[in-house]
Amino acid sequence: MSHAEEYIDIEDLHPIDIVETLATHHAWDFDRIADDQIAMSIEGQWRTYSITLAWSAYDETLRMICTFDLDPPEETRPKLFEALNLVNDRCWAGAFTYWAAQKLMVYRYGLVLAGEQLASADQIACMVETAVIASERYYPAFQLTLWSDNTPEQAMNVAIAEGFGRA
């Protein structure tokens, strides 16, 4: 049994029920918007991240978006899009995009559960954790890209690298 499943029984649970149980366990602020959707707020080092998970029975996908406010000056948006390409080349489990109308940076990921598979609590916890880690990792690079003279390539040097090994 996985660590996350110690406090949740996933047998015949709706994926959003699992998310709600995880949110309660981690004391994350959340609101169950509908049977198939939940919104959460998770405090990070740089920002508070808004995370929404929604279940689509049609294509059997648990969709997650993690957003944070970002309002770049119009003249620096081309640099932002260059930075997004560089960041997305480094992200294997999801991707960033910028929603200009809402002034939001968005990290998106979809967990496909075709064939009536069940999502485990560990899978869902990993989705949320990966979104927050990626947002925390690349937030400084986005800031440098937009509000300094650094090129997107230079700004990427501040992205905190993933740790390997043990101390």
Image (cartoon, grey):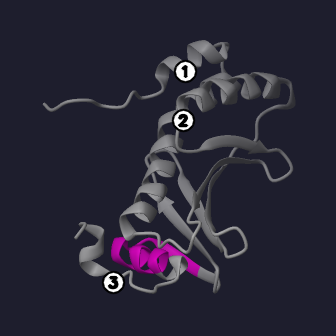
Q: Is disc 2 in contact with disc 3, using a CB cutoff of under 8 Å?
A: no
In the image, is residue 149 above or below residue 20?
above
Q: Nearer the viewer, residue 157 or 76?
A: 157
Residue that mark 2 sits on: 91
Q: Nearer the viewer, residue 133 or 144?
A: 133
Mark sitting earlier along the chain (2/1): 2
Residue that mark 3 sits on: 9
Quick one: SS at disc 1? helix
Q: Residue at x 56, y 66 (%)?
A: 113
In the image, is residue 13 above or below residue 99?
below
Residue at the left extreme of this rendering: 167
Mark sitting earlier along the chain (3/1): 3
Quick one: SS at disc 2? loop
Name the mark nearer the viewer: 2 or 1: 2
Q: Is disc 3 in contact with disc 1, using a CB cutoff of under 8 Å?
A: no
Residue type at the position of mark 2: Cys
Mark 1 closeness class: few <14, some 14–19, many ≥20 residues within 10 Å: many
Q: Quadrant of residue 149?
A: top right
**Can residue 146 be seen at all in this image of the molecule?**
yes
Specify the segment rendered in magenta: 18-31
In the image, is residue 11 above or below residue 84?
below
**Can residue 147 be seen at all in this image of the molecule?**
no
Residue type at the position of mark 3: Asp
Name the mark nearer the viewer: 2 or 3: 3
Using the image, tell me which numbered label, if any, was put on residue 146: none
Using the image, tell me which numbered label, if any, was put on residue 156: 1
Report the quarter where the N terminus lies. Answer: bottom left
Which secondary structure class fits the magenta region best?
helix
